[in-house]
Amino acid sequence: MSAPDAFLLELFREEMAAHTAALTEGLLTLERGAGATTEPLMRAAHSIKGAARVVDLLPAERIAHHMEDVFVALEERRLTLDAGAIDTLLQAVDWLLGLSLVDGGELPDWLDHHAEAAEAWSGRIAALLNPPETPAPPPDADPPQAANLAPEAEAPPPTAAPGPALPNPPHRPNHPTTAPRPTGPSR
């Protein structure tokens, strides 16, 4: 890939700043359960996808495309997002914003260096569309008794593996995804 046209890259950056802010705000509103609508999220992801296509940034286009698919599924009530899924989307938004801040001349090398991370983000977001199903116990099955549980069954479930490393985004002390978010039952 050659470096994108400087004028188009600047337009891409402006689009990214506006639409990543809309995604972040909308996702945080969803996380709080404050009655967010998905239409602005779908529009923002669609706009990022188009802007990335114009400057030939296929990794950003793919990530935004998967985000748009997630928001469409959410709108159609085929999907719900838990706090972990929202965190994944917020981290991917930060990754996209970091990509948009890379100097145009360094962009081809940066993309080569971060190709695996881009594929990982794309895959993690696409995987949100197909969450693993927990099989329901048969209707006549008795619940296990605590005394019969194996020691490993009593241990908490393993935590998910961390996502791919983010590019070195600029320091944004007031950015919602860098500020600590409340944890606990309110999520």
Image (spheres, helix red, strand yellow):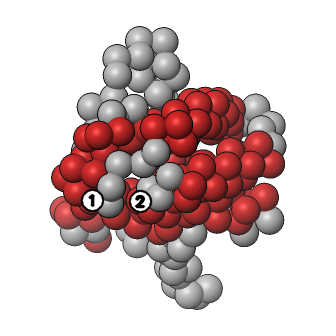
**In which image quadrant can residue 69 be found?**
bottom right
| Residue 34 or residue 57, whichever sits in front | 57
Residue drawn at x 28%, y 51% as measured from the top left: 108
Q: Which residue is mark 1?
A: 115
In this rendering, the answer to whether 49 lies above or below 77 is above
Q: In the drawing, does residue 4 fall left or right of residue 153? A: right
User: Is residue 168 shown left or right of residue 76?
Assistant: left
Residue 168 spot, x, y in % from top left: 27, 31
Q: Which mark is residue 47?
A: none
Q: Amino acid at mark 1?
A: Ala
Residue at 40% from the left image edge and 66% from the top image edge: 123
* Residue 151 position within the rendered picture, expressed as x and y whole percent measured from the top left: 19, 62
- Residue 148: x, y in percent? 28, 70
Real-space CA distance between mark 1 and mark 2, rounded to the nearest whole angstrom: 8 Å
| 90 left or right of 27 in image | left
Question: Which residue corresponds to the image point at 71% horizontal and 65% vertical from the top-left?
Answer: 73
Circles 1, 2 touching at the beta carbon (< 8 Å) = yes
Residue under label 2: 59
178 or 138: nearer the viewer:
178
Let me know if residue 107 appears in the view: yes
Determine crowd level at label 1: few under 14, some 14-19, many 20+ residues with C-alpha closer than 10 A: few
In the rendered image, residue 41, in percent from the top left (x then y), is placed at: 70, 46
- Residue 158 sits in quarter: bottom left
Say whether disc 1 or disc 2 marks the residue closer to the N-terminus. 2
Q: Residues within 10 Å of mark 2 (few under 14, many from 20)?
A: many
